[in-house]
Image (tube, rainbow, N blue to C red):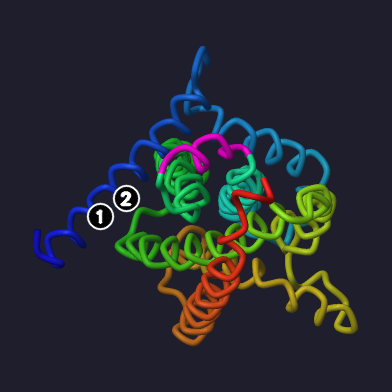
């Protein structure tokens, strides 16, 4: 077999493995579930109801607070679910890694793909429900595709780093679950950026999730195209972090089998 055919065969094998892993994640998640994928929307909905009860009276100046909050909640949980599950993906698949020739980076990637599937289904429900709250269906919604891609790349990069480090230092998983709520509240999801005192804005702006949530709100909340400089900034951040995560992951992966 020629080198080109060998490389093609290997790539197809990896794609099949990735598909099988992603399918497994979806099936396991919804196995014996009564409402299935709707759980992906139910959790953000519960948070939204809490925000409405606690914050909506305080943010009367915000036009359509329900739409504002929901446009951030969905994508926060996309990031949160992937990192929380992906950080354990290599350790949890130690038996497969030891017995089958499969690239370890496929396990975090499978978490991203399965969560993308959940998000798309949740977005369908979102579009139906949010129409009642004044959401406008415009061509600007197509911006969700590139924005979601660069956010998924950023999320995958974070997950790769966390999953690799967690193989050697199990405290990483515990620490990440501890600081996630802090990152959530440091992201303007339930509140508006205008409420942040100027002296503390640098803290919010140091949080990269802040910029991605801001991007998503352009097509979903403002029914407008995103700011090109913001889109470029997020694209550069995602690409740079992805390259860094691959470098770190490749340096650590050779000792995974012995470490897990």
Left or right of 244 on screen, residue 114: left
Q: Is residue 128 visible?
A: no
- Asked if disc 2 and disc 1 are in contact, CB closer than 8 Å, the reply is yes
**Residue at 44% from the left image edge and 53% from the top image edge:** 103
Q: Quadrant of residue 249?
A: bottom right
Left or right of 234 on screen, residue 65: right
User: Which labelled disc corresponds to residue 247?
Assistant: none
Q: Which is the main secondary structure of the residues drawn in magenta?
A: helix
Where residue 166 sits in the image (x, y, percent)? 72, 53
User: Which labelled disc corresponds to residue 10?
Assistant: 1
Q: Is residue 28 visible?
A: yes
For the image, the number of numbered tags is 2
Give the extent of the magenta segment.
Answer: 92-100
Does residue 74 sit above or below 129 in this rendering? below
Viewer-nearest of discs 2 and 1: 1
Classify mark 2: residues with Cα within 10 Å, few (<14), some (14-19) or many (20+): some
Does residue 194 sit above or below 59 in this rendering? below
Where residue 187 sits in the image (x, y, percent)? 73, 63
Q: Is residue 156 magenta?
A: no
For mark 1, give the secondary structure: helix
Depth order, front residue of 175/221: 175
> In the rendered image, which quarter contains the N terminus?
bottom left
**Residue at 57% from the left image edge and 53% from the top image edge:** 75
Q: Quadrant of residue 199?
A: bottom right
Does residue 96 sit above or below 185 in this rendering? above
For mark 2, give the secondary structure: helix
Q: CA distance from mark 2 to mark 1?
A: 6 Å
Depth order, front residue of 158/60: 158
Where residue 74 sits in the image (x, y, percent)? 57, 48
Q: Can you identify the residue that label 2 sits on?
A: 14
């Amino acid at each position: 077999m020629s080198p080109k055919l060998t490389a093609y065969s290997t790539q197809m094998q990896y794609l099949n493995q990735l598909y099988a892993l992603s399918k497994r994640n979806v099936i396991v998640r919804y196995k014996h579930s009564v409402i299935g994928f709707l759980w992906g929307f139910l959790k953000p909905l519960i948070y939204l109801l809490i925000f409405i009860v606690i914050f909506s009276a305080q943010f009367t100046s915000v036009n359509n607070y329900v739409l504002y909050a929901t446009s951030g909640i969905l994508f926060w949980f996309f990031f949160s679910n992937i990192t929380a599950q992906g950080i354990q993906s290599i350790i949890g698949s130690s038996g497969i890694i030891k017995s089958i020739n499969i690239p370890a980076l496929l396990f975090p990637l499978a978490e991203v793909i399965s969560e993308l599937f959940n998000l798309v289904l949740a977005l369908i429900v979102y579009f139906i429900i949010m129409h009642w709250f004044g959401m406008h269906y415009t061509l600007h919604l197509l911006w969700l595709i590139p924005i979601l891609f660069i956010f998924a790349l950023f999320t995958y990069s974070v997950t790769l780093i966390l999953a690799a480090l967690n193989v050697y230092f199990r405290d990483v998983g515990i620490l990440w679950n501890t600081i996630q709520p802090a990152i959530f509240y440091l992201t303007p999801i339930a509140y508006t950026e205008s409420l942040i005192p100027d002296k503390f804005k640098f803290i919010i702006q140091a949080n990269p999730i802040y910029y991605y949530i801001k991007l998503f709100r352009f097509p979903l909340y403002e029914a407008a195209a995103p700011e090109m400089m913001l889109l470029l900034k997020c694209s550069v951040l995602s690409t740079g972090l992805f390259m860094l995560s691959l470098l770190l992951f490749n340096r650590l992966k050779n000792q995974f089998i012995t470490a897990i």
